[in-house]
Image (spheres, rainbow, N blue to C red):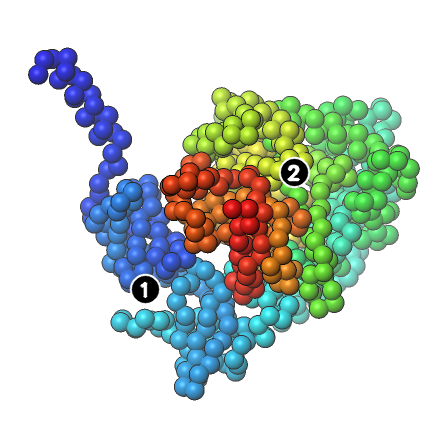
Amino acid sequence: MNKKKQSVSKRNKSLHSKNRKKSYRGHIIGEVKMMRSGAALVLTDDIREEVFVTGPNLNHALQGDKVKVYLYARRKGGQMLGEVTEILEHRERSFVGTIQLSAHYAFLIPDNRDMPYDIFIHPRNLNEAEEGMKAVVKIIDWPRGAKNPFGAVVDVLGKAGAHDTEMHAILAEFELPYRFQDSVLQAAEKIPEGFDNREIARRRDFRKVTTFTIDPEDAQDFDDALSVRELPNGHWEIGIHIADVSYYVKPDSVIDREAYERGTSVYLVDRVVPMLPERLSNQLCSLKPHRDRLCFSAVFEMDEKAVVHKSWFGHTVIHSDRRFNYGEVQQIIETGKGDFQDEILQSHKLASALRSIRFKAGAFSFERVEVKFNLDEEGRPTGVYFNEAKEANWLVEEFMLLANKKVAEKIGRVKKGQHAKTFVYRIHDRPDPEKLENFSNFVNQFGYSVKTTNRQAIAASMNRLMHRIKGTNEEYIIENLAVRAMAKAKYSCKNIGHYGLSFAYYTHFTSPIRRYPDLMVHRLLDRYLNGGSSYSDSACELKCVQSSMMEDRAVKAERASVKYKQVEFMQDQTGKKFEGIISGVSEWGFYVELKENLCEGLVSIRDLDDDFYEYDEKNYRLTGIHNRRVFTMGQVVTVEILRTNLAKRQLDFGLVDR
């Protein structure tokens, strides 16, 4: 072989070696992620890829368990195979499902798809649960060789299918509380109603300044208010007044410990499960009109172009003059007439300027449509409608963003050589380059483009894209994929900025009634304004991790409650045909979102009996091996309702336009 051919041969071998996945042997440690089939993926940082474990090789490991896995091969397609050899840490959790009884024993049939096993229950552990009841069960044993785990009923939720039962079941499934302990309620009742003149004297008094709240029509708690007044120099003073929860909820009190465990309020389709007892969230801390209320405020002096000239942060007392809902404020913006029209219109003008500044700096604009239900007295859905953000929503949003940004800057931005004191930040990392590239390739199929060269280019082209797709068939799909391409926002004491908002410093200061991190921010800000020393970094980070975890659970529960009502709404529609858009593609089929009501269901690959279909994960599509028919995200199809499974919150569609 001549030298040239030898060189090419070596280079080809080298390239082949680089492209081939590395083989591993030995053990790794990771976390179990269950699949519908009963198999699992184990996620680990050790080898930076997922390890596939069959059901029998899990050896009783379940969702979230920390396990030791022996790696022994790669299956066809290149995925690592392994076997769980040791469960290092069982994730303490309970399971929700329906009780099934027989003459001598009982089972819980779990609702959660992450739990592929029925749980055996001895009659003495039924805790008065009866056939067909929804219950919460904890695993108490799983003997070696036993196919099913053994459990005990810890709570009976009620008859399966009843509205309240199912909402409580969703909360329990995601390990969220659905009632307060008596000790917490009793502690809240003991908090006195009023406050004395000494408390007012130590606060800045805004009671004579025009102040109002703007909230959804069905809001029960009002945790933020705006005050507006013109200053002698022609500038505007905007006060963002936030309920002073820290005045009522003291660190390490029984109410504080409960709020920390909950982390956040949870918003299901029909109710709010509050972080704080209603005596606080709906009464003492709620900024109701025509009542004196204690606040922690961020006050800004701004010119007509919304440039901030002065900032002030501190404790205040306010007196709200009017409670507005978004619809009322929107009407004033559109007509120029209504209560406090001058203040509303000036606020709108400044908020619009702030919004323009933010987008020019590279912020992203994702306006998501919110699905809502009309419910009858028994909680059954009678109709679906959609909430879309308008100028009234943006007015409130921009001032809340301003307050959050400026509070974070107050503590986090220090002179060169100085160390910032420990603080809670809301951080948002840069998007994963591969996800962004895949998204860009996907939208190219629709004739759109996204520039990925730098942050400003990404944000500008993404915002142009969101504007261009308004009203198109692919709008909702592209919006969803754009959000998925972004990193997830979370809480941390280690500031990296907020990529999506294009803020170097950002926190959550504006909702302590419903978010624990905001309460932490109030306490830390007060501590530092009064010259206090820096808080423990490790203790702060631990609380941030807890808050992020509870926020994630709450979001999943909220989505599950919407999905439940969608399935319930479609129960009597079996056999009806609808036009929809393919909203997701997977190896087991494709999801279709109905245009009429945004309900989503699955067209199973098993029902596509005209061909064998291959799944292309990168391009979000299924392709027929023989007929080359393609099903891809954003495609319009006609489907009929085949089945509805309320217990599993599942809609099965059949394809009509074959």
Local crowd at mark 1 within 10 Å, few (<14), some, or many (≥20)?
A: many
Residue at the spot of label 1: 60
What's the residue type where badge 1 is placed?
Answer: His
**What numbered label is drawn on residue 367?**
2
For the N terminus, the image quarter is top left
Q: Secondary structure at mark 2?
A: loop
Q: Earlier in the sequence, mark 1 or mark 2?
A: 1
Residue 442 seen in this snapshot? yes
Residue 496 placed where, x, y %?
Answer: 50, 33
Relative to 371, is 648 on the left or the right?
Answer: left
**What numbered label is drawn on residue 636?**
none
Residue 341 placed where, x, y %?
Answer: 89, 37
Q: Please, which residue is most extreme toward the left here? A: 1
Determine contact: label 1, label 2, CB under 8 Å.
no
- Which residue is rendered at x = 26% and y = 52% of the image? 82
- Which residue is rendered at x = 43% and y = 76% of the image? 107
Taking 302 as reference, is 170 above or below it? below
Q: CA distance from mark 1 to mark 2?
A: 43 Å
Q: Secondary structure at mark 1?
A: loop
Residue 52 placed where, x, y %?
Answer: 31, 50
Relative to 656, is 438 on the left or the right?
Answer: left
> In front here: 11 or 144?
11
Residue 90 placed where, x, y %?
Answer: 36, 62
- Which residue is rendered at x = 55% and y = 59% of the image? 642
What's the residue type where badge 2 is placed?
Answer: Glu
Residue 252 seen in this snapshot? no
Q: Please, which residue is most extreme toward the bottom here? A: 103
Local crowd at mark 2 within 10 Å, few (<14), some, or many (≥20)?
A: few
> In front here: 250 or 49?
49
- Which residue is rendered at x = 20% and y = 21% of the image? 11
Relative to 640, is 214 on the left or the right?
Answer: right
Relative to 11, is 45 on the left or the right?
Answer: right
